[in-house]
Amino acid sequence: AGTTLLSLSCLVKSEKYFYILPLTIILITLTIHSKNEKIKMIFSVLQSIPLLISLPLIIAKGDKSALLVVDVQECFMDFTGTGDPGTLAVADTSAIIPIINKMRKEAGRIFDTVVRSQDFHPDEHISFGPTFGLEPFAHLGGNGGLPLTCFSPDSGMTEDSACCPTYFVDRSLVDCDRQLCPIPENTSASVLNSPACTLCRDSPDDCFETMQAMWTNHCLQVGDSGFPAQLYTEPEDVVVQKGYNTYVDSYSSFMDNTRKLKTKLDDTLTNLSIGTIYIVGIATDYCVYFTTLDALRLGYKVYVVTDAMRGISDVTVASALADMEAQGAIMLTSEDILSMDYPINEASPPKMNEQELSGVGLASQINLLTVVGFFFVLTASLI
């Protein structure tokens, strides 16, 4: 029955695989009526074949496309509406806003949906150096990032997880001469309230370790986390926030930095039947880079619009672009987008010719007759 339902799901996705449902029902019927145990076992095994055919279609991404605008926010801009740089400014970022705006206004038909990710940090976030009495960028001082111990919630979502500096979980696990450690007397009290500090101390096997870079306080919920006034937006845009959990950091718009926890983005795109993503934003070598890699791992087709993003350094940007392409991302420019003949989002689906319509009708008739026949046989066997 489960196989039949899965195959039926496949039929909803693709009419050309209409044969899967009758094949599955025939095999189930033969299994029910066979009196030979060996033959019954063979038929049971054969039922997995339609399932294997159906499964890739059931789990496949949708056929719509989205423009994903990664972290184009005041906090990352080289200058904001006040004329000052953002709290974690990236050079030349103001130059990408006209490019993104032009893409949306002149080639917007390509995108079924526009999604804007938003770094949205509370005060004393776990990625801020001052939260632990440390200087911003302390991870560049030679001892690396701050060791953290984290737990994975049953939901697998970033909003339900938490991390705690390993120093406060088990002091013996950290060598402060060789590793970055918090300054206890200057550490924010909110850090010690992290549920991971207690849970991972009591149940260490349920937790995992990671390293956290130390940044300046940035993209505060009550600060400059908003979107630039110059950025073209529409009320229908979907905004997906990340980094709003005090105890979890996320470069990627899809996952936390350990890639063990998910944000809401994948579920959001799946619900919108998105299978293709065009990525622009900030920063090429951090949030754009990790977002792209996660999108590829999750099965999306990814286009990276190279002139509609900016990064931190030429060296790391070049490395990130090369790796994104090597992992399967397709590189193009905004001019490539503007010159497209709108292949993704047509105003209406192409019309079927008479032969194709006949085939669809035949498939529906076969499915209907097969279902009716199955229930007839099943009913007769019970009388």
Image (spheres, rainbow, N blue to C red):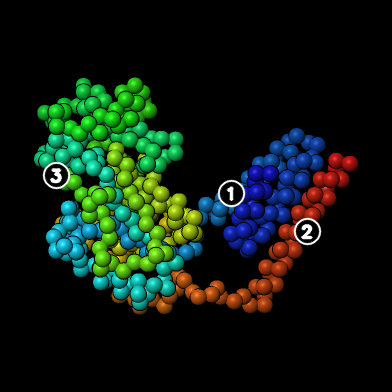
Residue drawn at x 31%, y 54% as measured from the top left? 118
Q: Secondary structure at mark 2?
A: helix
* Separation (CA) of disc 2 from disc 3: 68 Å
Disc nearer the start of the sequence (3/1): 1
Q: Label 3, on which residue?
A: 137
Query: Can you tell which mark lies on residue 52?
Result: 1
Q: Nearer the viewer, mark 2 or mark 3?
A: 3
Q: Amino acid at mark 2?
A: Leu
Q: Is residue 72 left or right of residue 42?
A: left
- Helix or strand or loop: what does disc 1 sit on? helix
Image height of 220 relative to 183, above or below: below
Who's the residue at 68% across and 69% down the image?
359
In three-dimensional space, the C-alpha distance between marks 3 and 1, rounded to whole angstroms, equals 50 Å
Q: Quadrant of residue 74?
A: bottom left
Image position, residue 38 (x, y; %): 73, 36
| Residue 248 place in picture, x, y as percent | 30, 40
On screen, residue 3 versus residue 315, left or right, reads right
Q: Nearer the viewer, mark 1 or mark 2?
A: 2
Give percent across and percent down for residue 238.
Answer: 40, 59
Tell which of 77 and 174 is nearer to you: 77
Badge 2 is on which residue?
369
Within 10 Å of disc 2 (Cα), the crowding (few <14, some 14-19, many 20+) is: few
Q: Quadrant of the N terminus?
A: top right
| Amino acid at dot 3 | Phe
Out of 363 and 40, give the one closest to the viewer: 363
Asked which quadrant contains residue 154, the reply is top left
Depth order, front residue of 185/168: 185
